[in-house]
Amino acid sequence: MELKVTNYECLFKVSVLKTLKKQWKNLPPTWKNSDPCGDRWEGITCDNSRVTKLILFNMDIEGTISEDIGNLTQLWRLDLSSNLKLGGTLPVTLGNLVHLDSLKLVNCSFFGEIPDVLGNLPNLTYLALNSNKFTGKIPPSLGKLSKVTWLDLADNQLSGPLPVSANDGWGLDQLLKAKHFHLNQNYFTGEIPESLFSANMDLRHLLLDRNQLKGSIPNSIGLVQTLTVIRLDNNRLTGSVPSISNLTKLDFLDLSNNQFYPSEVPAWLSNLQKLRTLIIEFGQLYGQVPQDLFSFPELQEVRLNNNSLNGTFDMGNNITSSLHTVNLELNNIASVTFSSSYKNNLMLKGNPVCSIPHLSTTAYCKDVFEQKAAIGTLYTCNHPFSGFLVFRAPYFSDASDHITKLEQNLTNTLKACVPNNLSIQDYYFDSNTYFWVQVKICPISQSYFNRTEIINCFDLNSQGYNPPRVYGPYYFTASPYHSSSVGIIFLYYTTESILVLTSQVQYICTTSQKNCQFFKCVIYNRANLFIDRKAVHYWCSCWLCSPCCYASFIGYLCSLAKETSPERKT
């Protein structure tokens, strides 16, 4: 049965959004109109005159989120990402948005504690609050989000222990459908709970790097056989590394820079046949690396530098062709058996073997500098859209074989949405071994991208974008973008025709609406035709009885203008 929307509901919806407007600066020009649904405010999607989506990605919004947002009870998607001037604390009324499926507030300036009430959103599948300034603990109530598949709280100032149901009533261990635990770059303390992991989980990416976690790695981590990425590096973990031989789908493993007890290189490494990247720097490892490791068909990188590996290093004769880098610097390796089948980087500087005269001057015992692959065509334009894709666990150390694939992947994804020329401007690994890729996108046949195109096409944090698998987990941060505004322009009318003058084009529109005698409008952004109702003065015989007269007439006019425009309109 279809629900009818009352006039009261419409007025209430408008009043809620007007309250949000008062809290925000730099809103899209369409928000000056009176009806968010009928006048199609940018970033607003309605269903039966109810607001269901509020997406203002990278709109340079400034301000805070009003508590009135909790009155948009039919909202199922909220995305205010990449608005660095948008901050403050999150209102507890977000807990009223029980239909919410996706909440994305990536790369803003929110602070304070994450509200407990977010655990009251039963339909939430995607929660991304990364790259803000949140403090305090993870609310245990997030364990009630039984449908969540993506949880990203990375790059904040969160602290305290990881909540689990055994200790807190609710906890992360109850998120059995979650594929992504991105909790890196915070200040979490305490041990990783044994009860955090179970065989019933569907977890793929576990990112806990760059925290202050201590104690042993729980044996239960070996139960989560769906895991493909594990980053536990740069913590204060101790004890011995447990066997994870059951994790046969693992692509990426980094256990570097902890405080493990001295131990022999784990024999179970030979079972991880899918492994592409192995990193255990400063791991207190000794002994010899098993030859089987270097025959893994997809292995690309091994970094076991700054350990106590000793004896003779021998990669064997069955070395995979995909292997690019083996870094064993600063160990105690006394001799090496070289293989003629491996011609790529083998780094041995700082080992006793490099004191042998005939090896000391070879490339094996010198610093190795990666050569960047040639970047493709660099498109130039006056008003490009740009930003960084940040890959937190790429399965490679040499981008030369992969960067063109990413560029083609992005091109194919975006060209279906808006005509553009895309180029990768730069790329590099930072000190966290995160891989940063700078993307620049130029418009075609127009000077600027309009706001609707930015919202619909360029939010690469969207669940709809999938980079090549070798790039691993990622997030996107956009640079501020300012669409064009051309100021005040007037409409003049004759009895049957209306002449629309803009700085770029002229439209001749004809209308049969004879009751409207005079009006003028403000047009912003030459790529869009926006009507500012406050600046419109007209008389219509049906005005008092039906405000729809105005909306119908202006809608008809703008549709004619778009049809006759030589440029593409939204």
Image (spheres, rainbow, N blue to C red):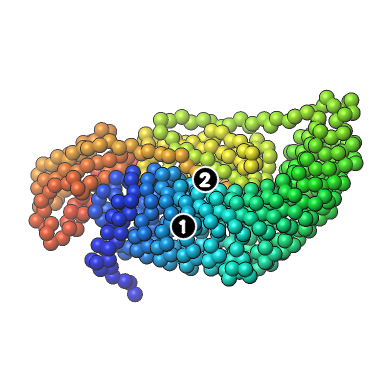
- Check disc 1 and give the amino acid type: Leu
Disc with the residue nearer the chain's start (1 vs 2)? 1
Where residue 348 is drawn, which disc sits there?
none
Residue 263 left/right relative to 404:
right
Q: Which residue is mark 1?
A: 103
Residue 51 seen anywhere in this rendered image of the structure: no
Residue 232 left/right relative to 376:
right
Q: Which residue is mark 2?
A: 476
Name which quarter of the figure residue 169 lies in: bottom right
Q: Answer few, some or many: residues within 10 Å of disc 1's Cα (few below 14, many 20 plus, some between 14 and 19).
A: many
Task: Provide residue 417's location: percent of width, then percent of height.
Answer: 44, 46
- Residue at 84% x, 43% y is 309
Task: Provide residue 396's location: percent of width, then percent of height.
Answer: 68, 42
Please say if 131 is above or below 449: below
Residue 167 seen anywhere in this rendered image of the structure: yes
Q: Answer few, some or many: residues within 10 Å of disc 2's Cα (few below 14, many 20 plus, some between 14 and 19).
A: many
Residue 535 left/right relative to 261:
left
